Image: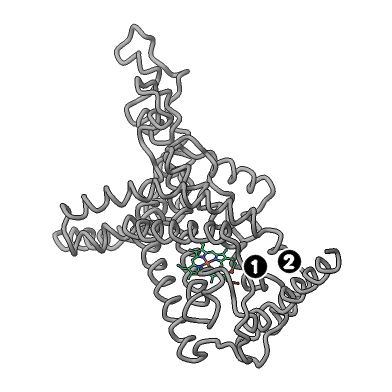
Amino acid sequence: MLRFFAALVLALGLSVPAIAQEGAAAPRAETGGAQTLDDILRRQAQQKVDDEFRRSNTGDPAAAAPITAPLGTRGGQSDSDLWRALRYDTADVTTQTRGPAARVLIQDGGMWWLKFREGPLLIYGAALLGGTLLLLALFYLIRGRIRIKGEKTGRTITRFSGVERFGHWLLASSFLILGLTGLISLFGRKVLIPAFGHEAFATLATGTKWIHNNISWAFMIALVIIFVFWVVHNLPDRTDLNWLAKGGGIFGKGHPPAKKFNAGQKLIFWSVIILGGSISASGLSLLFPFEFNMFGATFAKLNAIGAPGWVGLDPLAYPLTPQEEMQYAQLWHAILSLILTAIIFAHIYIGSIGMEGAFDAMGSGDVEEQWAREHHSLWVDDLRASEISQGKEA
Ligand code: HEM
């Protein structure tokens, strides 16, 4: 008899994992509408879980007890029904605070955002900036400084007016300050707090945030100035294809002909305008929290034309809670800023130590004629032609 019981216990014990395994694949109906093991495992593995069964399980007012009965005021909802409604933002909440986000008491997407911000964003961001600096150092070692090849003439040509240089340096100085203060905000918790402690970082972070918020206006104004002055010279044309095909002449002998801006510079210009513009827009939505809901609206438009499907994605989340709007704005702002910073590293390199004679264009505004002939031959030809025609007219 004893042996029989021992065998029974063993058999049951062994079968439990098998039952649990089957439970993993069991349809939700078999769990009486509750979560399955599969749901839990998927959630733990950060995979997508179809939570519609919970989302819609927020009580049935038709089944409500009359208001005179015990618990009747709940309108047919149990405690868990109410919490589910709060979590999925379907509860009818009224608050005294009138802010747009005050009604959302539980915000389901916060952990995803926090984990991404603390992990991949920092790791890939650091790799992008560090990798770019490394590549530029390598490029300098291999290629060296791009020198003026021909005999210098001693004559100069005016390349940028005072206003153009003012716009450029306003853009450059504000961008550098924004970049530095932005990186302090992004990496502070992981890098600076362990190094300098909470007290010191709290002071630094407060100052950094104030500077970042206020300098942003200078960047936006400068963006408009350079756009107005340079957009005409940055429209793509046929010379760009030739310039790109020859790799800008970086490794070859001569430089392909170029107008005022070559194709490489046009790419920099449009990166600054498009990325800088989008960084500014998302920055404004961070500066005035919950006022501009641009991400939900954009996601809805992208879903309507089926854009996520083109790259094998599910439709994008919509509608978004006000907090989710801010999370997307923060991530977008940070990712684009990191990309633009990497591009600007390359720009600063080529505009300073990377190329002889380039800095003068933005320094004094005047460049050596031979430099201009080598790098922007069509621009020099145009200048000469208009001088001649003006001379004829005079
Ligand atoms: C302090 C570092 C910087 C230096 C030394 C520098 C240098 C230069 C120089 C020499 C030029 C003229 C090139 C030519 O004559 O063809 C130029 C143009 C330009 N810079 Fe900068 N720059 C700096 C920072 C920035 C920043 C931070 C931005 C934008 C956020 C920027 C955006 C531009 C743009 C859009 C142009 C016109 C297109 C081009 O030449 O690539 N610059 N810069």
Q: Decide: is 118 above or below 238.
A: above
Q: Nearer the viewer, residue 127 or 222?
A: 222
Q: Which mark is residue 236?
A: 2
Res. 22 in view: no
Task: Report x, y in % for residue 70.
Answer: 29, 12
What residue type is disc 1 on?
Lys
Disc 2, SS: loop
Q: Decide: is 275 above or below 372.
A: above
| Residue that sits furthest to the front in the current view | 394
> Residue under circle 1?
266
Check contact, mark 2 vs mark 1: CB within 8 A.
yes
Task: Report x, y in % for residue 73.
Answer: 35, 14
Q: Residues within 10 Å of mark 1 (few under 14, many from 20)?
A: some
Q: Residues within 10 Å of mark 2 (few under 14, many from 20)?
A: some
The structure residue drawn at horizontal position 34% and vertical position 6%, both measured from the top left corner, is 68
270 vs 171, left or right, is: right
Q: Which mark is residue 374?
A: none
Disc 1, SS: helix
Task: Report x, y in % for residue 209.
Answer: 33, 48
What residue type is disc 2 on?
Pro
| Residue that sits furthest to the top in the current view | 68
To which quarter of the image does residue 235 belong? bottom right
Q: Nearer the viewer, residue 365 or 169?
A: 365
To which quarter of the image does residue 233 belong? bottom right
Inter-mark Cα distance, 2 to 1: 8 Å
**Does ligand 1 reach within 8 Å of label 1's beta carbon?**
yes
Res. 128 in view: yes
Name the image quarter holding the C terminus: bottom right
Q: Decide: is 382 above or below 121.
A: below
317 vs 127, left or right, is: right
The structure residue drawn at horizontal position 47% and vertical position 80%, both measured from the top left corner, is 353
Name the image quarter holding the N terminus: bottom left
